[in-house]
Image (cartoon, rainbow, N blue to C red):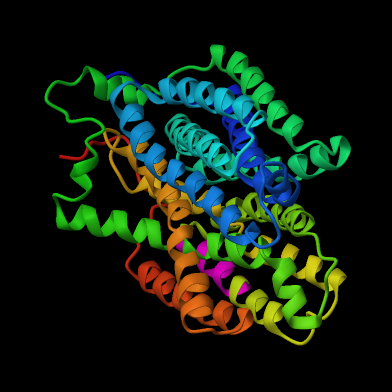
Amino acid sequence: MNQQKHIGILSLPVLVAALGYFVDIYDLLLFTIVKKPSMVGVGATDLTMLVDSTRVINWQMFGLLLGGVLWGVLGDKKGRLSVLFGSIILYSIANFCTGFVSTVNEYAAARFFAGLGLAGELGAGITLVSELLPKNKRGIGTSLVAGIGLFGAVAAYFTFHATKDWRLCYKIGAGLGVLLLLLRVSVVESGMFKNVKEQEGVKRGNFFMFFTNATRFKKYLVAILIGLPTWYVIGILVNQSDRFGKAMFGSTTIDSGKSIMFAYAAIAIGDILIGLVSQYFKSRKKALLLFYFICMASLVLFYSSYNNSDTRMYIICGILGFSTGFWAIFVTMGAEQFGTNLRATAATTIPNMVRGALPLVNMLFLDLFQQSLKWPIVKSGIVTGIIVLMVTFIAFYFTEETFQKDLNYVEE
């Protein structure tokens, strides 16, 4: 078996993976930032805005969910680089087309294909970096990927406010994808993948292997559930900070796009810091637990009487964002828990399963609690948060520690 060659933390593969995630986040959060003008631009009204915008974001998330499986399987069958090239091509085309949509249905369809393309970015990048870096640097390397990448949300916010043209913002995203494609020409494939590819009789990228073994299925399920708080915080609290502000202190001037910008700037800082925290503790789980506790404290602050002005809402959204800056470690743990023949499938599907869970959390928060039970938005948010955190802590308890794990093995 060939010797795996390691790379430095600031090498080209790490940079390219970080920029790929930058483009991923730019697009993923762009809809939230341009939601109102773009929805009006495709025919939505004040009466239909909530339902129509939820439909568009749900289709985007469904694309991410489906794409996570497709690109993950391809990453283990054909290689990590095939995903990094194929996903960005599809994303760029879909984003360019988004700049020309004229109806809500066209908008939803374009976001579905963009989500389908984006789904491969983070998982393939984290898998490649995890396999190329030595194990004592994996956490820092993947945290840098996520930390740099998350500033894509900040870029999306300032791009829109500089151009005031939501269609141009999507076209710029397509251009970023093309530039990223050119950068990837010089990136090398993972040595671990090459070694496994040369072995006969090893099943690669078989998604159903996660469900044919009880131990493997449990690992896969808990790897997904430990990431749930991220999209509860971003998808509900920060994304709908304008509605919460109106209900809690009567504000009609909160810009949810600005809330997203503050939250993601703070998430980026958290994601870089958690790599260092994990390195200090020599533990992924201890670092994750620390951020869970910060998240719970920030949720109490969000729902407290202290949150009584636009400025404080923005500050608290930033604190909430920082508290969910465990995305890098969460995805890294997903990659580390499975063998090389299933690693890309795991690392790509796990974060997209969490993203794809947002429509389910929205059903709980919006459809059940607010529309069926007629609960106010604050009560609905609190109960939804309690349920999400209970599930998360149960999953955390059953999650294995992966800090010192050797990744050069295969799943039987």
Residue 379 visible in this rendered orientation of the protein: yes
**Span of residues in magenta:** 285-294
Q: In this view, does 47 lie above or below 16?
A: below
Residue that extends furthest to the bottom in the rendered view of this protein: 305
Q: In this view, does 283 lie to the left or right of 253?
A: left
Q: In this view, does 310 lie to the left or right of 77?
A: right
- Residue occupying image coordinates x 74% and y 62%: 318
Q: Quadrant of the C terminus?
A: top left
Residue 14 image-quadrant placement? top right
Counting from the top left corner in percent of width and height, residue 199 is at: 18, 21
Residue 410 image-quadrant placement? top left
Marks counted in the figure total 0
> Magenta segment: does it hold 178?
no
Q: Is residue 265 left or right of residue 119?
A: right
Q: In this view, does 193 lie above or below 351?
A: above
- Residue occupying image coordinates x 36% and y 68%: 395
Q: In which quarter of the image is the N terminus?
A: top left
- Residue occupying image coordinates x 76% and y 45%: 154
Counting from the top left corner in percent of width and height, residue 21 is at: 59, 37
Counting from the top left corner in percent of width and height, residue 170 is at: 68, 32
Q: Which of 34 and 129 is in front in this view?
A: 34
Residue 283 visible in this rendered orientation of the protein: no
Residue 290 image-quadrant placement? bottom right
Q: In this view, does 144 lie above or below 383?
A: above
Magenta segment main secondary structure: helix
Q: Is residue 208 left or right of residue 39?
A: left
Q: Which of 259 and 288 is in front in this view?
A: 259
Q: Which of 360 and 387 is in front in this view?
A: 360
Counting from the top left corner in percent of width and height, residue 192 is at: 34, 26
Q: Nearer the viewer, residue 65 or 16?
A: 65
